Image: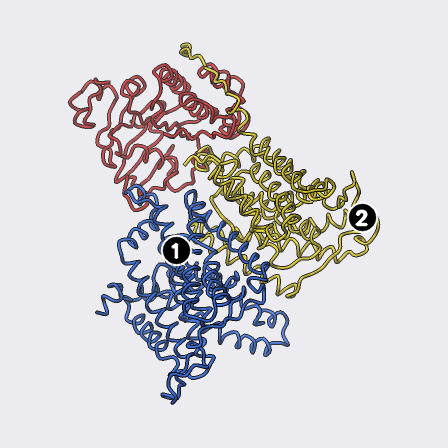
Chain colours: A blue, B yellow, C red
């Protein structure tokens, strides 16, 4: 049963299995294990980034394509839900419509970009996605009457998903039985299901062809696989899942804005999570997202403390300033690509 | 030794279409200018916008020329190139701010010396950075595009952040040297002096590059290397050394472009290079990766289109250039002047 | 064959994960033309490219004038006096014929008498001197490829299937040019499928199969023994 659920793709390392089980259990019971708003928010973030990173890894780790437009697809999903809730009223129908519309738009856009770039050279894709994504980000902030511009939009989500909705009057294990809890479990189960679907995908014949293409595109073509078709397909699928993640994220945050969905910083976060976790291993997405979101949430505070503590020294406090968080991410990123190209998962599997 | 067997060469005559085809890309620049003239109501605004578009195009060309050659020669795609633009701007502006006496004086000579000093400092700094970047970031990942893209993006971020560390988190404002301020009036149109200077500098850089590429041995090696690096090595040239040279020259040019862009915008931020990189990529894609001529034509087209759309529909400036890129790729999937790869 | 200009000893070469050359050992005598023969996929082109340093040998020695050049980069090897005319000719199509020739002359401008010789051998090159080499016909490109190798004195020429797809008139021009190279004292190692040409030019022959040398001897021996040819290559030279 379990083997079937994970498509026979086991973690292949005892330590990794334990860590993954711990993450699964922590996320599944997060509202009960870690009371408080911030920990729950962190758990939901981890879930959403697991989807986002795993879908990105479909492209990068399995398709061998670098995209800088993943946050654009993420944003399209988020804005899709936001706009439909704004214009169609507060209902699940609007949520469904916005989500589906966002996914379709993302798929169409991904298809067009893929057709233009992958047909010629896979590296065009990296450059073109960068250009298109930044153009979309500029458009979103400029058409502020529609999108709220830089300020973004606050969402009126269906009442059943807000703390105001109580489905049980008494607390259970000290946790309020309200819409927020439902919202969290919507996020959690969506993540679980999408992750298992993606795991199934990479272990299907489709996934095997992708791996063959990643190893040697020429040979795959020679054996008779239409490389462009497969790469385009994985790009479109990945974009749709990213849009779905965006929709879920918008519902969780009850807010969309350029900084939370479209910004290049989030794109970098995704890249880092994929690389740290391990490219081409779905489990890497889980590890990468968890480690990274935890570090982001709690390490920045630590940097602030360290910066204050060293304020007497030259340059050091500037380097440790929490605003320079990205500097250290960049260094970490370069070092991981050099020294741990297979990421945490690759390391753990290699150690056995 | 016996006589060589007879062999009569046959001359193939090219028909009209074949003879015109190579010039089509170059004709697109005036075509865009003409289209601009159709849509822009006033002739003087059109002239102002055209000069400004050409100036912008020249600056983008200076930033992009190195990148396209770096790709052509070693198949290296460097996302860190944007960082050189930013560093060039910060170093150049720092120098300009150090010599307020020279920049504020109403003397063409002193002003140009100040700008010259800024340019030299910027190009030196980015040239040296190029050496280090090539050695540390790029060399370990030759031949692996995926890693190259990721690692050079990492390099871009780290350098941008280091700029914040050294120059502070805020943007820096500057004013142009005294004699480069203001505009001259020509045919009723106000043409900013600095933009005219930028057009001049861009032309000089382009012609100098063309000269080196066409009339020196080094240039021959570079052009041949873009097409078939292996054969260049088999003839006896160490292409890796040539590549390092091109990488450094390209980085220094990015630094020059950075200073010029700083003087054009009169404000600099650490992210400016990353932002320019988007236009630079569009230019080298539509020009044809590895082609300096294509890069030049593409840069002028992008500069003109950007300025015309910014005037007509300000919100669509960047989108119009992406549209241009899509059109060009539909017409020629490898860019306007595709470099024939031997392999 | 005591005086070998090139001597391969137990050379093995991999391309990606494939073992292409297993154990190649043979000598190329100085001042002679040696033909490298064998079926398609036997490893002939790989042998030439390994000698030139374009693919690195995993094991073994490539002795050129008594020095092991196996681990050296191609540019260094070229400067020692080797030149390759690859199967795809390696013409720089964006460069003019003149520029192609200028690049081939590594140490300086081509001497006038040498240029005269090249123009005598290959008149089309003179006609199209300032045209992009990409516009040349296939035969003219092959002439340029050989002419490029002749731009300077080289001691050893590695020539890969020069006659492939060419008209007989052009083939005879190439044969003439290579004889003049040999006449000037150079050594040649040539891969050739055209047996008439191989026989016309070759002094010695080495036959490969499956990444190994299976026979070496003089060209005459091989040419006069049809049974041996069938045995070695599954083909008879007399057919050609």
Q: Of helix, strand and loop, which one carries label 2?
A: helix
Residue C161 point in image, percent of width and height: 33, 26
The one nearer the camera, B320 or B73, is B320
Is residue A234 in view from this perspective? yes
User: Most extreme residue toward the front, as rendered?
Assistant: A88
* Label 1 sits on residue: A59
Name the spot of residue C156 as percent of width and height, x first: 39, 28
> In x, y percent, where is residue A123?
45, 48
Q: Is residue B205 left or right of residue B136?
A: right
The chain holding disc 2 is: B
**On the rendered image, what quadrant is the N terminus of chain B found in?**
top left
Which residue sits at x=57%, y=68%? A324
Quadrant where the image shows the C terminus of chain B: top left
Tell me, for residue A341, which label it has, or none.
none
Can I make out residue C58 in this image?
no
**Residue at 23% of width from left, 36% of height from top?**
C210
| Residue on which the image places disc 2 | B179
Q: From what the image shows, is residue C209 above or below residue B158? A: above
| Residue A30 percent across, percent down from the top left | 38, 79
Q: Up-down: is B114 above or below B297?
A: below
Label 1 Cα crowd, 10 Å radius (few <14 / some 14-19 / many 20+) = many
For the residue pair C139 and C107, the one nearer the viewer reads as C139
Q: Image quadrant of residue C138?
A: top left
Residue C54 in the image: above or below residue A339 = above
């Amino acid at each position: 049963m379990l083997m079937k659920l994970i498509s026979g793709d086991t973690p292949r390392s005892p330590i990794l299995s334990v860590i993954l089980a711990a993450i699964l259990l922590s996320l599944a019971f997060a509202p009960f294990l870690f009371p408080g708003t911030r920990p729950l928010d962190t758990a939901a973030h981890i879930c959403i980034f697991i989807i986002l990173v795993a879908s990105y890894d479909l492209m990068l780790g399995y398709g061998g394509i670098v995209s800088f437009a993943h946050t654009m697809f993420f944003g399209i999903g988020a804005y899709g839900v936001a706009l439909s809730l704004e214009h169609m009223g507060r209902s699940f129908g609007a949520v469904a419509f916005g989500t589906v519309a966002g996914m379709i738009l993302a798929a169409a856009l991904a298809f067009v970009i893929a057709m233009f770039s992958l047909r010629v050279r896979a590296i065009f894709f990296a450059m073109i996605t960068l250009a298109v994504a930044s153009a979309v980000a500029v458009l979103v902030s400029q058409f502020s009457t529609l999108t709220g511009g830089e300020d973004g939009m606050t969402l009126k989500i269906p009442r059943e998903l807000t703390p105001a909705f109580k489905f049980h009057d008494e607390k259970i294990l000290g946790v309020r039985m309200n819409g927020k809890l439902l919202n969290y479990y919507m996020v959690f189960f969506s993540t679980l299901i999408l992750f298992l679907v993606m795991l199934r995908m990479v272990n299907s014949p489709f996934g095997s062809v992708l791996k063959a293409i990643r190893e040697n595109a020429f040979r795959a073509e020679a054996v008779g696989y239409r490389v462009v078709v497969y790469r385009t397909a994985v790009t479109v699928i990945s974009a749709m899942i990213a849009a779905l993640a965006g929709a879920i994220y918008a519902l969780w945050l009850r807010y969309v804005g350029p900084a939370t969905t479209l910004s290049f910083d989030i794109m970098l976060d995704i890249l880092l999570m994929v690389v740290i976790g391990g490219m081409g291993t779905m489990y890497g997405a889980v590890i990468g997202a968890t480690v990274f979101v935890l570090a982001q949430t709690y390490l920045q505070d630590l940097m602030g403390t360290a910066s204050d503590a060293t304020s007497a020294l030259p340059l050091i406090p500037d380097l440790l300033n929490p605003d320079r968080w990205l500097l250290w991410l960049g260094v970490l990123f370069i070092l991981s690509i050099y020294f741990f190209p297979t990421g945490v998962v690759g390391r753990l599997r290699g150690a056995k | 030794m016996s006589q060589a067997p007879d062999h009569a060469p046959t001359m193939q005559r090219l028909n009209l279409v074949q003879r015109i085809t190579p010039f089509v890309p170059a004709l697109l620049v005036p075509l865009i200018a003409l289209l601009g003239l159709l849509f822009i109501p006033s002739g003087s605004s059109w002239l102002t916008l055209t000069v400004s578009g050409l100036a912008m195009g020249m600056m983008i060309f200076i930033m992009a020329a190195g990148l396209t050659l770096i790709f052509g020669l070693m198949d290296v795609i460097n996302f860190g190139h944007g960082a050189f633009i930013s560093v060039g701007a910060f170093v150049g502006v720092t120098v300009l701010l150090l010599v307020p006496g020279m920049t504020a004086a109403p003397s063409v000579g002193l002003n140009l010396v100040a700008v010259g000093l800024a340019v030299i400092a910027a190009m030196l700094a980015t040239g040296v950075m190029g050496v280090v970047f090539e050695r540390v970031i790029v060399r370990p990942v030759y031949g692996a595009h995926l890693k190259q893209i990721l690692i050079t993006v990492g390099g871009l971020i780290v350098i941008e952040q280091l700029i914040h560390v050294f120059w502070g988190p805020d943007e820096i404002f500057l004013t142009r040297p005294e004699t480069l301020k203001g505009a001259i009036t020509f045919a009723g149109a106000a043409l900013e002096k600095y933009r005219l200077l930028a057009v001049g500098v861009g032309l000089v850089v382009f012609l100098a590059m063309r000269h080196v590429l066409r009339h020196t041995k080094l240039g021959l090696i570079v052009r041949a290397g873009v097409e078939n690096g292996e054969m260049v090595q088999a003839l006896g040239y160490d292409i890796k050394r040539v590549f390092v040279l091109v990488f450094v020259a390209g980085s220094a040019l990015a630094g020059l472009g950075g200073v010029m862009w700083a003087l054009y915008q009169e404000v600099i931020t650490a992210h400016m290079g990353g932002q320019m990189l988007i236009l630079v990529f569009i230019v080298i894609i539509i020009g044809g990766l590895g082609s300096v001529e294509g890069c030049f034509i593409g840069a002028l087209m992008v500069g003109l289109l950007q300025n015309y759309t910014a005037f007509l529909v300000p919100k669509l400036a960047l989108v119009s250039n992406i549209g241009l890129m899509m059109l060009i790729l539909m017409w020629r999937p490898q860019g306007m002047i595709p470099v024939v790869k031997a392999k | 064959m005591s005086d070998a200009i090139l001597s391969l000893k137990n050379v093995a070469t991999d391309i990606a994960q494939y073992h292409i050359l297993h154990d190649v050992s043979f000598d190329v005598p100085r001042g002679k033309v040696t033909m490298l023969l064998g079926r398609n996929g036997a490893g002939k082109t790989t042998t030439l490219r390994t000698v030139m340093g374009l693919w690195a040998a995993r094991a073994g020695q490539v002795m050129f004038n008594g020095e092991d050049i196996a681990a050296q980069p191609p540019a260094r090897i070229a400067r020692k006096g080797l030149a390759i005319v690859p199967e795809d000719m390696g013409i720089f199509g964006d460069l003019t014929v003149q520029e192609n020739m200028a690049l081939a002359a590594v140490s300086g401008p081509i001497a006038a008498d040498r240029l005269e010789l090249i123009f005598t051998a290959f008149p089309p090159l003179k006609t199209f001197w300032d045209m992009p080499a990409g516009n040349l016909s296939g035969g003219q490109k092959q002439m340029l490829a050989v002419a490029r190798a002749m731009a300077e004195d080289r001691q050893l020429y590695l020539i890969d299937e020069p006659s492939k797809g060419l008209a007989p008139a052009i083939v005879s021009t190439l044969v003439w040019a290579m004889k003049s190279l040999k006449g000037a004292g150079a050594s040649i190692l040539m891969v050739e499928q055209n047996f008439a040409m191989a026989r016309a030019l070759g002094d010695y022959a080495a036959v490969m199969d499956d990444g190994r040398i299976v026979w070496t001897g003089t060209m005459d021996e091989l040419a006069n023994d049809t049974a041996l040819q069938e045995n070695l290559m599954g083909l008879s030279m007399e057919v050609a």
